Image (cartoon, rainbow, N blue to C red):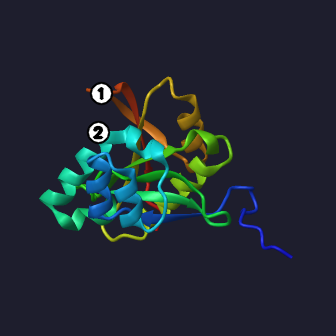
Amino acid sequence: MPVSTRSANNVPKIELALLSASVLEALNAGSIDRASAEFGRSLPPSFLDHSGLWGYRIAQAREDPTTLRWLVRAVIDAETQDIVGHAGFHGPPDESGMVEIGYTIEPDFRRRGYARATVSALIDYAGSEPGVTRVRASISPHNAASLATIRPFGFVQVGEQIDEIDGLELIYEVPSQR
């Protein structure tokens, strides 16, 4: 009998696999074939749609290679091994112990619980790290799907900001779970 990879609340089980500096370099260069070879398996071609992200993250990794473990991971369905998105943190914890999460689920895999599973995994990772006191999510007030995704985790709105690319964002935080 197959073992279910869904939790009791029907959230899929996922794995987060770190994207190395060489994978980020290849994505930043626009080469999905090289990035896939560096990763060891095919990455979705739509990863190339996020060129600004790859450029920003590889610059962070070049400036301080120790930050790489906080940056970007592939989100993988534990049962099917499909790469369903990418997620990570905007960087290591700041001086107050805050980390900010970011995640993207591929369009073909949306509305299946992957975003919720990803947020849960990121919160768990942050909570296992010494010095992390809270987790932040900055979301457009018009992004109903992401607002609904974070709701069950107890995020509370603590402010708002204007992002130079995304415009108005609402800032939500939750204590890290230790």
Point out residue 93 in the picture as x, y percentages from the top left corner: 28, 58
Question: What residue would you read off at disc 2?
Answer: 52
Q: Nearer the viewer, residue 41 or 169?
A: 41
* Residue at disc 2, secondary structure: helix
Q: Dot 2 surroundings within 10 Å: few (below 14), some, or many (20 or more)?
A: few
Q: Nearer the viewer, residue 94 or 81?
A: 81
Q: Are marks 2 and 1 in contact (CB under 8 Å)?
A: yes
Residue at coordinates 32% horizontally, 40% vertically from top-left?
51
Task: Say which of marks 2 and 1 sits in front.
Answer: 2
What is the spatial separation of the Cα atoms under label 2 and label 1, in whole angstroms? 10 Å
Q: Is residue 84 visible?
A: yes
As drawn, which residue projects farthest toward the left?
Answer: 63
Point out residue 77 in the picture as x, y percentages from the top left corner: 61, 60
Q: Amino acid at mark 2?
A: Gly
Question: What residue would you read off at disc 1?
Answer: 165
Q: Nearer the viewer, residue 134 or 141?
A: 141
As drawn, which residue projects farthest toward the right?
Answer: 1
Q: Quadrant of the N terminus?
A: bottom right
Q: Where is residue 36, by image quadrant?
A: bottom left
* Horizontal side, residue 46 vs residue 61: left or right: right
Q: Nearer the viewer, residue 114 or 154?
A: 114
Residue at coordinates 69% horizontally, 55% vertically from top-left?
11
Point out residue 26 in the picture as x, y percentages from the top left corner: 29, 54
Q: Amino acid at mark 1?
A: Ile
User: Above or below — where is 171 with respect to 178?
Assistant: above
As drawn, which residue projects farthest toward the front?
Answer: 33
Q: Where is residue 139, by image quadrant?
A: top left
